[in-house]
Image (cartoon, rainbow, N blue to C red):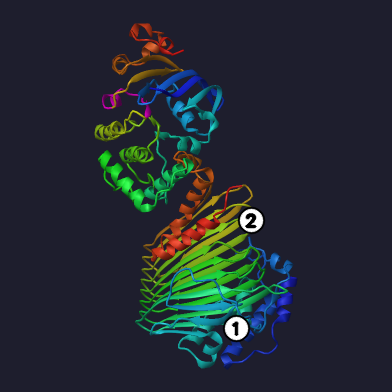
Amino acid sequence: MSDFSTQLASALPQDMGSGPGWVKTLRQGGVQNFRAHGLPTRKDEAWKYTGLGVMGQNGVQLATGFRSQVSGVSNPKPLAESGCQVDMLDGQFLEQIGSPRPGLTVLPLADALHQGVAGLQTLLESLPGPKSGSGSSFGFSALNTATLEPGVVVHVAAGTDAGRLSLTWSTRGDDVPLLFNSRVCLILETGAKLELVEQFESLDDNANGSNIVLQANVEENAVLHHVRFQQESEKAALITRTEVTQQANSEYAYYGFDLGGGLVRHDLHTSLLGSGAKSGINGAYLLDGNRHVDNHARVDHIAPGGFSDQYFRGVAGGSGRAVFNTAVCVHPGADETEARQSNANILLSARAEVDTKPELEIYADEVIASHGATVGQLDELAVFYLRSRGLNEQEARQLLTTAFCQSVSDRLADPVLGGVISQRMMDVMPHAG
Amino acid sequence: MSTMLKITNLHATVAGKEILKGLNLELEAGEIHAIMGPNGAGKSTLGNILAGREGYEVTQGEVMFNGKNLLDLEPEERACEGVFMAFQYPVEIPGVNNTYFLRAALNAQRKYRGEEELDSVGFLRLVREKLEILHIGDELLHRAVNEGFSGGEKKRNEIFQMAVLEPTLAILDETDSGLDIDALKTVAEGVNRLRSKDRGMIVVTHYQRLLDYIVPDKVHVLADGRLVATGGADLALKLEEQGYAWLEDGGIATLNVESAAQTAKP
C-alpha cells in the first residue's frame, strides 16, 4: 500500500457510525477491504495509465464529519432550467431548491438510511467490488462504502415522469485539501422517467478530491437520462464511479463532458439484465495544461436483444493526457445484441497523449458489433479552407475542434442544454501548441 | 478600367520542384480570364498561391492586388481583402453547419473591413436573396459543410459561398471537373449572374466545355509554368480542335494567335 493509502486508512473512523445494522455491516466491509488493499496502483491493469501520486503530493486528507457551514456560499447555477435542484457541498446534501414533481422523492442519504426507502438496501448491497475480493482496483469504492452516509437518494415512483433533476457538486478550499466521499442512489421503478443533470464545478481554485459513487437501478420500461458535466479546478481530483443495472426494455442514456479537473477518473458500468434494454454512452473530454482524464466505460449484455452505443470524442492539447478504455461483453445467451463502440481523438500538441483501447468479447449468437478508435490531428486542409473564407487560424481551429466535440452535445435530447454545453466547450477549447 | 491584379515574373516551387517559371498576368476589374493548359502546367498551383495555401513557395516575383502585395498576407487577410477561391476539391467539414460557417466567415470579413456584423436575421435575409439570384434551393444550408455532398452539390456550394461573400477577385479552380453537363450549366449560370463590373474572375480549366457557358474576355494558355499564348474567347475553340500537342512542337506561331509576350503590357 502507498503512504497515501495508509494515511487514509488510519483516518477512517473506529466505530461504524449510526444507522441500521446492515448499514454498519456494509461500512465494516468497506473498512476491511480498504485496510487490506488500499487505493489502486499502476499495477492494476485498469489503473495502468492513471497514477494517484499527485493527491499524496498535494497532502490530501480524508474528510470526516461535517465542516461548519459558511454563509454566503452557493453552488454554481445549473446549466439549464429544472424544476428541482439539489446542491451538494463537500459531498454533503446542502439544500434542495424547488419542489419535486409528484412521484419524485429526493432525500439526503443519511435520512434515507434511517427512514428506509424501497429498494435502497438491495441497491447499496449490490455494489460489486469491495465484497468480491477484487483487490485494490475497487479501492475507491471500498473507501466510499467505509464512510457511507453523505449523499443523496432519488426515487421515482412507477409510471411517473419526474422531469429534470439538477445535482450540482462543489467543494470549498481549506487549509489542507480534503477528500470527500459521497453516494448517489437512483431508483427508477417500472415505467418511471428521470433526467439527472450532474454538474461539478469548484468554488475556488482548490486541490480537493471527490470520490463519488452513483448507483442506479432502472426497472422495466424505465428511462434514465444522465448528463454529467464537470469543470473542476485545474488541481482538483474527481474520482467517480457509475453503476447502472437495467431491466427489460429500459433505457439509459449517458452524456459526459469533461472540461476541467487535474486528475479525473470515471468508471462507468452498465449491466443490461433484462431483454431489449438500451444503453447509449456518450462522452467528450477536452484537455489542456497538465490535466489527466481517464474514462473507463463497460457494458455487459446479459440478456438478449439489447442495444448499446458507446460514442466518445476527445481533444488533447498542452501536456494533457487522456485515457479511454471501452469494453463490451456480450454474455452467453445475450443473442441478437447490437453493440457499437466509437472513440476518436484529436491531438493538438506534440506533448499531449491519448491512450485508447476498445475491448470486445462476444459469447452469444447473432450479434452485430462494431468498434473503432482513432487518434489524429486536425485536418490542415480543412483549416486552410476555413481561413480562405476569412476566419483566422485560431478561429478555424477552434471551430473544427468544437464541431468535433459538439457531435456529442448534439446527441442530447434538449437542444437548449446542448447549446449551453457546446458554448462552454468552445470557451475552454484547448489551442494548438 | 483599372488593373486589379498584376502578377509579375512569378516563380514558385512545390516540394522543391519548380512549377511556375516566370508567370505574368494582368486582370482588370470586370474581366473574366480563362487559364487553360495541359495537366501539370501549373494551373492549380497558381490558384493555390493566390489563395495562400501552405506548401507553395514563391521564389521570385510579385503579386499586386488592388495596390497591396498579396503574398505578404495571410490566407484570411486575402479573403478579407476580397480574394475568393472556389476549390477544385471542396473540403468536407463534419459537424460544422453550412449556414453557421458562412455567417462566421462573412462576419469575420465584415469585422476586418470595419463593418457591422450581421445578426442571424440579417444573415438569413441575405442568404435567401442570394439563393434566389442563383436559382438554387436551400437544402444545402442545413447540412454540415460539404459533408456527403455530391460533386455537383459541392461546386454549387462554392458558388453559393462566393455569392454571399461577394469577393472582388474570384478564382475558380477547375470548377468544371467531375461535373455532368446539367451540373456544369447550373454552376456556370451561377457564375454568370455574379459577373459584375467591379469583380474580376480567373477561371482555371482543362477543357473548353465550361467556356461555352462562361464566355471569357481573355484566354491564356499556361504551359510549363509560363503563359505561352493569350487570345480572345476563340482561342479556347482552337485549343479544343488542336489539343495541346502543338506546345511540344513549339508551334505557337502556327496557331495564328498573339503570343503572351506580345500582349504583355509594359
Say which amino acid is labelled 2: Gly
Could one spot residue A359 in this view of the protein?
no
What is the quadrant of the N terminus of chain B in the image? top left
Q: In the figure, residue A72 lies in which quadrant?
A: bottom right
Q: What span is colored magenta in the figure?
A: B199-213
Task: Indicate the position of residue A255 as horizontal and vertical percent values.
Answer: 46, 65
Find numbered disc 2 in the image and state the secondary structure of the residue it sits on. Answer: loop
- What residue would you read off at disc 1? A148
Please determine if labels 2 and 1 lie on a single subunit: yes
Q: Chain of mark 1?
A: A
Q: Is residue B254 left or right of residue A36?
A: left
Could one spot residue A247 in this view of the protein?
yes
Q: In the figure, residue B47 lies in which quadrant?
A: top left
- What residue would you read off at disc 2? A289
Find numbered disc 1 in the image and state the secondary structure of the residue it sits on. Answer: loop
Say which amino acid is labelled 1: Leu
Q: Sequence-wise, which precedes: disc 2 or disc 1?
A: 1
- Compare residues A409 and A254 and report the one nearer the observer: A409
How crowded pointer 1 is (Cα within 10 Å; few <14, some 14-19, many 20+) is rated as many
User: Is B173 drawn above or below residue B125 in the view shown?
Assistant: above
- Compare residues A293 and A33 and report the one nearer the observer: A293
- Say whether residue B200 is magenta: yes
